[in-house]
Amino acid sequence: MPETPCLSNLGPVDLLDDPTDTRALTQQRFERMTLAGGDGLPDVDIVGLPPGPSWPAVVQTVALLRFRHWFHPWLHQKYGDTYTVRLMPKGRPLIFFTRPEHAKEIFAGDPEIFHAGKGNAILGPVMGEHSLLLQDGAEHKRARKLLMPAFNGQALRSYQEMITEIARDEVAHWPDGQQFRSHDRMNVLTLEVILRVVFGVTDEQRLAALRPRVNRTVNVSPAVLLVWSIPALHRIGPWKAAVENQVELDELMYAEIRERRTAPDLAERTDVLSRLIREGEETGDRLTDTELRDQLVTLLLAGHETTATALAWALYELGRHPELMRRTQAAAEAADADGDAWLDAVMKESLRLHPVIPMVVRTLMKPQTIGGIDIPRGATVGPSILIAHRRPDNYDDPATFDPERFLGHNPPTNTWIPFGGGVRRCIGAGFSLMEGVAVLREVFRAVDVTASETDEPQVRNITSVPRFGARITVTPR
Ligand code: HEM
């Protein structure tokens, strides 16, 4: 397995921001983001670190990446609240913490020391070097500051109406009395939301061109990304298809960005892309076309299937609990603050019981002490979201779906962490909860939902999704 590309070795952007030759821009990204080489961090000795399996690193890596729903609970039961796994390529330790006070120490850690971007380097060829997910330190701070206003409360309220319309239209097309995979339909819905609300694309022709290319980008497999650094592969098989898809997607995105910069209604537009363009111009810190493209692809990849999965689990759980479904229907009908509070609690409980992202990690740039344990530079640490959400001392009867837990109060700090925490906490957390409430409202106003078949989580790239698609059957009310 090749080493992760070393983003910190990249020089300053020397690209003239001329998007007329978008293929060249795409190619330049591939070259910059696939530099093979180490990450400059030392090998790490595991002596003195919390216990963990002595299996070869390759076995532990596969167990963590492919079988995490079994592996985490097993590690927790065998080794206790803090455990160490060793990962490819160098057998470096990844230390997991499951107690809230330890999650707090990690999330509150100095961002100059607790780096998150390194762990996402594999996404470089697709997301690009400016991506919020890939940056650390001052660059991350700047990008976050530019993006934040598009996700504040006022901005979120302005997206609601369009999301409601998209959801209403989607539900109106569901088959009556026939079982279907709610995860597939939620994916279609959240993609539409991203394209219209985040990119602000409304032209039907461009939407039709974007949809399949975006889908192929979301579905690109880690196996393809892992060996992207071998240019010869770009001319064959799945790599050729992925490269061509990126070239085509970039062409469409740069065209959209270029047009938007000069759109006569730019000042009134509420979509995220228009806000980002305006924000840069107002503060004098203008985002280049490549920066805009990288952030938009990041929002797309981070915000589309994640929200769809949380929604699909919510539909599945409500479909299995008729009394909770009736209560959700009443909340949807009420469409007031109390009703929305219940819908919000349903989303939160869905994310507790079925966390979409099972863990978040930070790589240490300097030695640190966490939970009283001295951890060397180069080690990676992170809270296990999977275990945090299932600890009986955090939640009574943790295996039961019970939205009441979140009604009218927040759970104790750092026991509910589906969006991570600290300066890296998911920038779209408020967006996805707002979207979830709007979608649940439209679904439960229109239909009764039942889920007769059981489902379970399955690993899909970095997320966990319902193995059987969270199948449901709906009938009009
Ligand atoms: C239920 C839906 C979602 C879940 C479960 C989720 C989860 C996460 C998690 C766990 C992280 C890492 C946080 C950390 O390292 O501490 C993250 C980061 C991020 N998410 Fe989300 N997310 C969701 C929806 C969204 C949406 C809707 C968007 C945007 C439209 C989005 C954009 C991002 C971005 C840009 C980051 C990187 C933040 C940074 O590094 O500063 N996410 N998300």
Image (tube, helix red, strand yellow):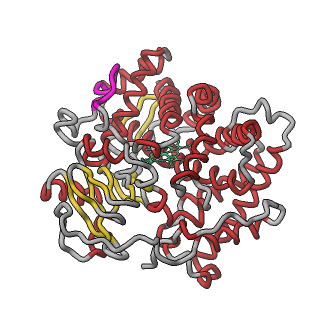
Residue at left 57%, top 44%?
144
Looking at the image, the residue that sits furthest to the bottom is: 232
Q: Position of residue 113 (x, y in %)?
A: 41, 55
Q: Main secondary structure of the magenta part?
A: loop
Residue at left 20%, top 42%?
391
Q: Which residue is nearer to you in this view: 65 or 419? A: 419
Residue at left 37%, top 27%?
345
Q: Which residue is nearer to you in this view: 275 or 353? A: 275
Identify whether 186 is placed above or below 131.
Answer: above
The stretch drawn in magenta includes residue 77: no
Identify whether 295 is placed above or below 225.
Answer: above
Identify whether 367 is placed above or below 44.
Answer: above
Residue at left 75%, top 65%?
15
Q: Quadrant of residue 421?
A: top left
Q: Position of residue 334 (x, y in %)?
A: 47, 14
- Total number of numbered discs in the rendering: 0
Q: Is residue 343 visible?
A: yes
- The magenta stretch is 402-412
Horizontally, is 443 left or right of 464 in the view?
right
Q: Which residue is nearer to you in this view: 173 or 304? A: 304
Q: Quadrant of residue 179?
A: top left
Q: Position of residue 240 (x, y in %)?
A: 63, 76
Horizontally, is 227 left or right of 387 in the view?
right
Q: Is residue 65 visible?
A: no
Q: Position of residue 32 (x, y in %)?
A: 63, 71
Q: Quadrant of the N terminus?
A: bottom left
The stretch drawn in magenta includes residue 411: yes
Q: Quadrant of residue 392?
A: top left
